[in-house]
Image: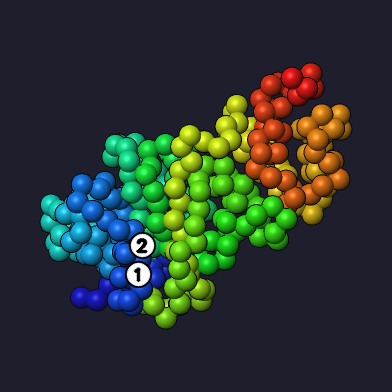
């Protein structure tokens, strides 16, 4: 019986064989790779990935799809029927190659979840809404630059690989899509003393992105600290580099002691 796509699970299945071939070529899977597919769905990517690598982990929330995948692929597919947002990637080992035509409704929390375990990951190839991909790679000063750009650029080198038209999916989504590659920065290019403080300051700065930093960070950062860090208090979040956000986070991690900034 034909599967009825479930909107709540972001089910838009890839049907265009040339798009599938281009994505798999970009991934370049090889035997021995520890491939992890998020949301295998009806298996459009799973089939060629398994043919190239021989085995694959897959995480799928939809039990009906999971049953069909088990029937088709048997033991070659190590299927985890669960919510990827709760999935512990560490259980799969290290040097993971993560792949997915992602459910767009959970793309931001899922990217943050992957960033939290970046040290386990070799690379990530994912299809996302094109507008989200543009936010991920945006540079300071760009109108698309925001929390997602800073927090992902802090952990990954990213490359936008290819655009995929809406017609490549069934059902056809209302948005265009793009594939992006993320490679963890190992060693990290910047290392905040406490990642929680980085999250905190970036979230606060972008929660009122039109305001000056003096206003949006009023509760966290005082005027002399901006001077000590050579950051203009009249700048807006959108103008700050990742390194500058890390400097603000390190100030907070030092117990908000202005003397610590000068050292
Ligand atoms: N990979 C298939 C393809 O390219 O045709 C399906 C892609 S579809 C956009 C997203 C897939 O992710 C669906 O199979 C959906 O059931 C699954 N999914 C949605 N939310 C999920 C979650 N929280 N955890 C795991 N899988 C999820």
Q: Is residue 152 above or below residue 134?
A: above
Tell me the SS state at disc 1.
Answer: helix
Q: Are marks 2 and 1 in contact (CB under 8 Å)?
A: yes
Q: Nearer the viewer, residue 118 or 113?
A: 118
- Quadrant where the C terminus sits is top right
User: At 24% across and 60% down in the image, what residue appears?
Assistant: 49
Quick one: label 2, few (<14), some, or many (20+) residues within 10 Å? Answer: some
Mark yes or no: residue 20 visible: yes
Q: Nearer the viewer, residue 252 or 86?
A: 252
Quadrant in the picture for residue 191 = top right
- Quadrant where the N terminus sits is bottom left
Quadrant in the picture for residue 218 = top right
Tell me the SS state at disc 2.
Answer: helix
Quick one: label 1, few (<14), some, or many (20+) residues within 10 Å? Answer: some
Indicate which disc residue 22 carries. Answer: 1
Question: Is 189 on the left or on the right of 17, as rendered?
Answer: right
* Residue 216 screen position, x and y as percent: 79, 43
User: At 70% across and 39% down in the image, what residue appears?
Assistant: 244
Q: Nearer the viewer, residue 220 or 56?
A: 56
Q: Is residue 69 above or below residue 238?
A: below
The residue pinned by badge 2 equals 26
| The residue at label 2 has a CB less than 8 Å from ligand 1 | no
Question: Is 243 on the left or on the right of 214, as rendered?
Answer: left
Q: CA distance from mark 2 to mark 1?
A: 6 Å
User: At 13% across and 52% down in the image, what residue appears?
Assistant: 75
Q: Residue extending furthest bottom?
A: 167
Q: Nearer the viewer, residue 125 or 109?
A: 125
* Residue 107 screen position, x and y as percent: 49, 56
User: At 59% across and 51% down in the image, what residue appears?
Assistant: 148
């Amino acid at each position: 019986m034909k599967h009825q796509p479930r909107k709540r699970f972001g089910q838009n299945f890839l049907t265009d064989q040339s798009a599938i071939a281009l994505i798999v070529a970009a991934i370049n899977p090889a035997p021995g790779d520890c491939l992890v597919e998020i949301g295998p769905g009806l298996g459009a990517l799973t089939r060629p990935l398994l043919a190239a690598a021989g085995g694959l982990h897959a995480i799928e929330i939809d039990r009906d799809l999971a049953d069909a995948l088990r029937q088709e692929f048997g033991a070659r597919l190590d299927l985890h029927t669960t919510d990827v947002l709760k999935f512990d990637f560490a259980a799969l080992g290290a040097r993971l190659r993560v792949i997915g035509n992602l459910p767009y409704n959970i793309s931001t929390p899922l990217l943050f979840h992957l960033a939290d375990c970046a040290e386990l990951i070799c690379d990530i190839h994912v299809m996302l809404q094109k507008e989200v991909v543009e936010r991920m790679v945006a540079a300071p000063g760009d109108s698309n630059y925001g929390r997602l750009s800073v927090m992902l650029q802090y952990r990954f080198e990213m490359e936008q690989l290819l655009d995929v038209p809406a017609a490549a999916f069934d059902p056809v989504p209302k948005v265009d899509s793009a594939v992006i590659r993320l490679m963890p920065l190992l060693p990290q290019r910047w290392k905040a003393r406490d990642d929680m403080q980085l999250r905190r300051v970036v979230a606060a700065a972008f929660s009122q992105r039109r305001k000056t930093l003096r206003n949006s960070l009023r509760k966290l950062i005082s005027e002399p600290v901006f001077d000590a860090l050579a950051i203009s208090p009249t700048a807006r979040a959108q103008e700050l580099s990742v390194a500058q956000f890390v400097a603000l986070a390190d100030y907070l991690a030092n117990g908000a002691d202005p003397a610590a900034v000068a050292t």
